[in-house]
Amino acid sequence: MPKKVGIIACTGMGKALASVGRYAALYLTTTLRPNDTINICFPCIVSEDDESLELLKNHPIIMIDGCSETCGKKILSKLNSNVIGHLKVWQLLGKYKGLIPDSRVNIGEKGVQLAKKIAEEASIIIDKYKKENR
Amino acid sequence: MSQTTKKVGVTACTGINLIDGTIARMAIYKVLEELRPDQTVLICLPALAAGVEEDVEFVRDYPAIILDGCEKKCAEKVFSKFNSNIKGIFNVSDYRVKYPHLKPKSIIDIGADGEKLAQIIAEDIAEKVDEVLANA
């Protein structure tokens, strides 16, 4: 039986696209794929919380990075992790043109739509993982 | 006042599994955008941990105030790894105990009570910013 996929959003605060990534992770784990995913707290990972590092070690991971600094990817590359997908919000904005979030505090209706698109992209990766690990 | 003490760096843990992480995030946004926009800079915790130059410089150059969401104190732990000058540490969990009648709605939408709580915390942090700058 395939393991649940760990979803990690960078949870950056400076840019609206990071807020979109955060929303996408929450939407994915609570609404779209709650039975197939587990939300892993990135700040807990960077502070080396044992429980979170254990989750990182034991689950395949989809990383959602908000901006081109790719903080999530940089940090996970130094840790014991199995990243099966890396979603870059700023690149996906290019694919879903027009879905520009309002602000970092309130991503607005278009930001929510973009977050849902990102969650759907993650969902495709999850389906592929499940198919390959039956 | 020296060049490096004209502003205070503020950060939130931005945790994603508890409502308190969202409240921390919203409180820091209130400080940055509404209460003390000219006196504060954001230090993005994930960026700091990843070694993004701008955030590492902010930690080195400015006194900092940290807002953690829960007892894991992730922001405080990350800051302790850097050459930081922490002037204030706040934790949302302390405010949840102090204001039990304020019940935030959810992680995605903290609701009216969550906003009130974030505002209270933000006002305390803003006062601390003033104190840090006055003593610089």
Image (tube, helix red, strand yellow):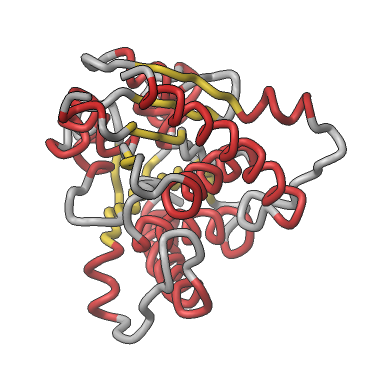
Is B95 situated above or below B23? Answer: above
Q: Quadrant of residue A92?
A: bottom left
Tell me the residue at 44%/26% (across/down). Answer: B66
Tell me the residue at 50%/48% (across/down). Answer: B35
Q: Quadrant of residue B52?
A: top left
Q: Viewer-proximal residue, B123 or A15?
A: B123
Tell me the residue at 59%/32% (across/down). Answer: B124
Q: Viewer-proximal residue, A111 or A133?
A: A111
Relative image position of residue A96 (x, y in whole percent)? 32, 82
Is A103 situated above or below A68? Answer: below
Q: Is residue B50 left or right of residue A16?
A: left
Tell me the residue at 37%/62% (across/down). Answer: A16
Relative image position of residue B34 (x, y in whole percent)? 49, 54
Is B41 situated above or below B106? Answer: above
Outermost residue on the left side: it is: B53
Relative image position of residue A127 (x, y in whole percent)? 44, 62
